[in-house]
Amino acid sequence: MTTMTTKITFHIQNGGQLNGQARVAGDKSMSHRSIMLGSLARGVTHVTGFLEAEDALATLQAFRDMGVVIEQLGDGCVTIHGVGKSGLKAPTKPLYLGNSGTSMRLLSGLLAGQDFDCVLTGDESLSKRPMKRVTEPLAKMGAVIKTSEAGTSPLYIIGQASKLHGIDYTMPMASAQVKSCLLLAGMFAQGETTVTEPAPTRDHTERMLNGFGYHVSQQGNQASINANGQLTACDIDVPSDISSAAFFLVGASIAPNSNVLLKHVGINPTRTGVIDILRLMGANIEILNEREVGGEPVADLRVTSSQLKGIAIPEHLVPLAIDEFPILFIAAACATGETTLTGAEELRVKESDRIQVMADGLQTLGVNAKATPDGMIIQGGSMGGGVIESHGDHRIAMAFAIAGLRANAPITILDCANVNTSFPQFKAIAANLGLTLTSQEEA
């Protein structure tokens, strides 16, 4: 595993095309949740397609630190020996969650109802991300969690077993992490916990809880849960992550003479905003061999070259594509005409300020890109080369790597080590499909 003290630089030779087929990394959201729910289940859960990248492995190690026996069998196969809802043990040290905001936010809810205290920590990037969005509603449920003065980690969680109570909470922002955090806390709370979201967000937690036999009531934009349930072990086949597939959906769209088939991709309707947006821009994306695996819709995606056009991105699609905007900004830069994004202020509190960092990078490449408080305005056209600062954000690094397909000069991307947090096979798959990418490591 790459240590975060290692500096990795990507060098992209401009031009080229993408052709062939690939199965990209397993879905990160589902990989996290499979470990969490499998650990709390009764019996043995077998997971295939697990994402063996730093973020998901941090979640796996956290549950090992709480006494769960988890076997890594290689090639994405994991066996979890569940301990039941009340079987976790107090960790002997802080739980280190690396770069994973998903792990920290979901675990804060899951651990608020345990009978032991614990501390959640992360790397420098995670330690800057806002946590009050989960700690404040958890406090309304009776949880006791201390943050830094800035409302960031480390999180100090005081065990409140049998003291949590359900709440009816309307979320101020659309966030699957906040929703999932409160539903997981609701498994340990007296009474019912109901979460109302302002716009649909990914529903992997609700689907997987039901898959483990734990009932979640869903009606419209509300999800409700109570403590009267148990998780029963099951088998989980994690589909490929559409957030990882998105880089190649855009790459094959913008590079002339490209034709790529992406296999076994999760097409959960709460995650397909990137396909909808690209199709509105004129992308040629076919959805083939649709099927359902473990309660999740899966398909193969074929994408061929197209001339994209600029659009006003519909705001209702923003929560369904929130992680894909770095690469969608690259698509916009290669489109004819103007693309505008509004309603995406959430991008400013991701691994980096993705609005400002992407605008800065696009401007470095000669693109007319203007950051706005909640989005961006991009005039499509030609794109040059240059040196890009990724600010340690994996999706920024991968997006600018794909930009090289349409740039008219080479691109160098700094600070790319965090690509290993979500998609360690990115370099190999990109090179196999036709991107000329080399990397340089420095201790």
Image: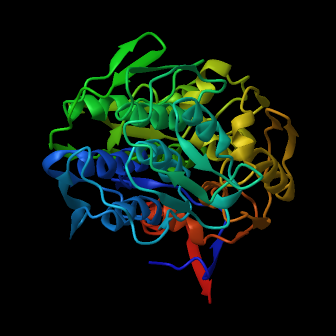
Q: Quadrant of the C terminus?
A: bottom right
Q: Decide if residue 201 is on the left or right side of residue 295.
A: right
Q: Quadrant of the N terminus?
A: bottom left
Q: Position of residue 22 (x, y in %)?
A: 35, 54
Q: Give the residue drawn at x 68%, y 53%.
A: 152
Q: Is residue 154 visible?
A: yes
Residue at 63%, 57% (x, y): give it. 405
- Residue at the far top in the pictured view: 220
Rendered view: 273 above or below 150: above
Across and down, in percent, residue 316 comes to: 62, 19
Q: Quadrant of residue 312?
A: top right
Which residue is more in the foreground, 303 or 248?
Answer: 248
Q: Please state which of residues 213 and 49 is positioned toward the viewer in this rendering.
A: 213
Residue 35: image x %, image y %?
31, 52
| Residue found at the very far left of the displayed protein | 43
User: Is residue 314 visible to us here?
Assistant: no
